[in-house]
């Protein structure tokens, strides 16, 4: 048992250490006065607490935490929502344990203070969450955001089903579709709100600069169908295809190929036999199953290759000629040790059986900002490379890692350069052209590829220019630069009325390295809690369920952990309504569990320069 005198000595020593930490916080507050003066008064208390937390994280306090815990005092592990009040409580406890009088303890001056009494940090976060993401649902405080598929523009029933299942925020990605489709989606959301009596917010993503692989030469204009066979090779399900226009009400799985003469398809009858020589010269017979006029559903028990201009003969001696078929998408199969050359020229790349492979790069700034020796990742990290040479119009990559049998390098795939300082604005000309529509119709704008305070300021200036200061802003953190600059970006965003953060875990995992992703997402959650900023937990949540109808066990656990954020985002998929229902159930169940964690606060080097 520890003696009283020893306990007092330990408390006195810890008191001095916590006083030193409080002094770091106060000095950080004073240094941040110019930024704090620009903050919206509604966020001033939150901005101060954010500065306090960053100041604490500029130090390594893990030993202090362990020593405080050993004395039975709060270990600072849950201080995010109210840093200074937490430090004050710990200081008072240590003062009493050390047997010191209040006048004998010189507590650092508090520095800048918020005006008057305010809500506790947790209440401020709840208020900000409701303002940004809507009121939530009974029994579930964590909101659900869902990415709309293109089909939502023409399917009001789908949108209503999504709202009924539990969607609180509809996400529309401006990288896809256009104003006509976006307007239809918005109309369906508002109609579903009226029908179901539920409030739904609409968030629209600005695409940001696109760093992607260029086009590849198209393949042959061919459509292949093949039957399903059992293990003995017997056909169990014949191959099906629409000649002309498909009718989803009859068969929405069969592909369709155009026919030049609509009168020819209109003359076909069920049971009729059609004959052709396919693209390989193989004779094939097709049986007509359905004839709708504009389209003919046919089946065949053998594999068939249809091609542009192919003639299909009918029993009456007439022929239908196939129209223009889309080209088959081609790719380059790259392996570890291969060379890939990124080019400024976006002419479709030729398909080669062996390297070196050449393919365009969509962002011209890369050729001036990239440096030899820096890492590069392609297609969500499937291909890991190192830059070996940089020229005015070419960047040479050595492939360090790919799949065991190589990985297909396709057109339009993302390129990540985590150590390259790309001098490009997060707000592109295309984004600026979309912003008036977003400002008029949406509740929230999600800013992609944001990496600096200036990026945030640029967006706010643009919103002020078009005369809309009511649109809420969410910052998508998807790069190392965005993570490292998050504190000053939040202080800049706090000039606005309502602000949130989205952890875009897809690109962020590639940028930081998969092994660091869990650590980084925790740091973002903690920092945003300190700033009372709502967080959206995004990317691949219940992905298998949304796309294939069955989740993995790991995905269910990941979805449950998302309850620590204020919102969880689902991506689109054919089973998205099932995914919403499952996520709603998971989050309701998790609501009854304590948010238990004990943070060990090592020095966070990325944010330390903001204090020093």
Image (cartoon, helix red, strand yellow):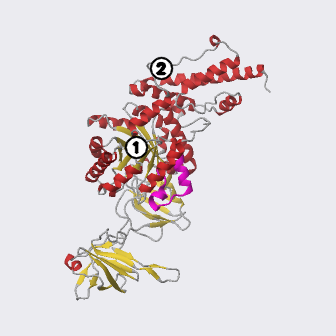
Residue in the image at 74% along x and 20% along y: 9
* Residue annotated with mark 2: 113
Q: Which residues are magenta?
A: 539-560
Instruction: Indicate the quadrant containing the N terminus: top left, top right, bottom left or bottom right.
Output: top right
Report the front residue among 552 and 373.
552
Residue in the image at 49% along x and 54% along y: 542
**Is 421 above or below relative to 274?**
above
Q: Nearer the viewer, mark 2 or mark 1?
A: 2
Q: Could you tell me how far apart the alpha carbons at marks 2 and 1 are, in whole angstroms?
A: 37 Å
* Magenta segment includes 505: no
| Residue with the most extreme left position | 263
Residue 35 rendering spot, x and y as whole percentages: 42, 27
Residue 526 rendering spot, x and y as whole percentages: 53, 37
Q: Total label count?
A: 2
* Magenta segment includes 559: yes
Give the number of the disc on residue 331: none
**Is 477 above or below relative to 156?**
above
**Is 18 above or below relative to 449?**
above
Q: Is residue 208 visible from the viewing direction of this image?
A: no
State left or right for residue 437 relative to residue 18: left
Instruction: Indicate the quadrant containing the C terminus: top left, top right, bottom left or bottom right.
Output: top right
* Sequence order check, earlier mark of 2 and 1: 2
Check disc 2: other Cα within 10 Å, few if <14, some if 14-19, many if 20+: few
Report the front residue among 235 and 510.
235
Give the number of the disc on residue 423: 1
Residue 450 rendering spot, x and y as whole percentages: 41, 42
Residue in the image at 56% along x and 56% along y: 553
Report the front residue among 110 and 20.
110
Q: How would you classify the magenta stretch by its main secondary structure?
A: helix
Residue 40 rendering spot, x and y as whole percentages: 38, 27
Q: Are marks 2 and 1 in contact (CB under 8 Å)?
A: no
């Amino acid at each position: 048992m520890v003696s009283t005198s020893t306990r007092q000595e330990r408390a006195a020593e810890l008191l001095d250490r916590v006083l030193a930490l409080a002094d770091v916080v106060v000095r950080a507050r004073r240094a941040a006065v110019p930024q704090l003066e620009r903050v919206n008064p509604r966020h001033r208390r939150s901005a101060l607490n954010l500065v306090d937390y960053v100041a604490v994280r500029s130090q390594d306090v893990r030993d202090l935490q362990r020593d405080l815990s050993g004395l039975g005092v709060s270990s600072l592990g849950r201080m995010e929502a109210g840093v200074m009040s937490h430090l004050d409580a710990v200081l008072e406890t240590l003062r009493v344990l050390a047997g010191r009088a209040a006048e004998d303890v010189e507590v650092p001056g508090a520095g800048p203070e918020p005006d008057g009494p305010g809500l506790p940090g947790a209440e401020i976060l709840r208020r900000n969450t409701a303002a940004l993401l809507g009121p939530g649902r009974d029994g579930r405080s964590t909101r659900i955001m869902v990415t709309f598929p293109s089909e939502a523009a023409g399917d009001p029933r789908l949108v209503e089903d999504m709202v009924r299942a539990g969607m609180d925020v509809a996400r529309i990605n401006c990288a896809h579709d256009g104003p006509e489709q976006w307007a239809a989606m918005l109309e369906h959301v508002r109609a579903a709100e009226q029908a179901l009596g539920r409030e739904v917010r609409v968030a629209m993503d600005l695409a940001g600069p696109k760093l992607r692989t260029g086009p590849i030469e198209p393949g042959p204009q061919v459509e292949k169908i093949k039957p399903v066979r059992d293990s003995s090779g017997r056909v169990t399900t014949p191959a099906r295809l629409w000649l002309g226009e498909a009718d989803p009400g009859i068969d929405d799985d069969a592909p369709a190929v155009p026919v030049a003469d609509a009168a020819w398809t209109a003359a076909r009858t069920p049971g009729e036999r059609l004959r052709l020589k396919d693209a390989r010269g193989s004779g094939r017979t097709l049986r007509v199953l359905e004839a709708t006029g504009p389209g003919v559903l046919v089946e065949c028990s053998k594999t068939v290759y249809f091609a542009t201009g192919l003639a299909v003969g009918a029993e009456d001696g007439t022929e239908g000629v196939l129209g223009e078929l889309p080209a088959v998408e081609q790719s380059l199969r790259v392996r570890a040790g291969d060379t890939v050359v990124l080019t400024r020229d976006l002419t479709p790349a030729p398909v080669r059986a062996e390297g070196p492979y050449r393919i365009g790069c969509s962002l011209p700034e890369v050729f001036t900002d990239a440096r030899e020796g820096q890492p590069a990742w392609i297609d969500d990290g499937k291909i890991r490379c190192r830059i070996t040479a940089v020229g005015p119009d070419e960047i040479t990559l050595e492939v360090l890692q790919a799949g065991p049998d190589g990985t297909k390098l396709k057109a339009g795939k993302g390129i990540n350069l985590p150590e390259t300082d790309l001098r490009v604005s997060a707000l592109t000309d295309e984004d600026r052209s979309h912003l008036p529509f977003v400002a008029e119709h949406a509740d929230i704008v999600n800013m992609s590829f944001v990496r600096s305070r200036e990026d945030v300021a640029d967006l706010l200036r643009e919103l002020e220019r078009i005369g809309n200061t009511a649109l809420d802003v969410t910052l998508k953190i998807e790069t190392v630069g965005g993570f490292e600059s998050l504190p000053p970006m939040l202080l800049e965003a706090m000039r606005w009325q309502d602000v949130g953060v989205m952890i875009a875990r897809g690109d962020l995992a590639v940028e930081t390295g998969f092994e660091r992703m869990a650590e980084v997402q925790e740091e973002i959650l903690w920092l945003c809690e300190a700033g009372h900023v709502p967080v959206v937990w995004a990317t691949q949540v219940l992905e298998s369920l949304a796309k294939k109808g069955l989740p993995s066990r790991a995905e269910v656990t990941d979805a449950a952990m998302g309850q620590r954020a204020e919102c969880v985002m689902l991506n689109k998929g054919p089973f998205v309504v099932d995914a919403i229902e499952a996520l709603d159930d998971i989050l309701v169940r998790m609501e009854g569990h304590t948010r238990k964690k004990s943070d060990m606060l090592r020095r966070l080097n990325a944010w330390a320069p903001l204090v020093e």
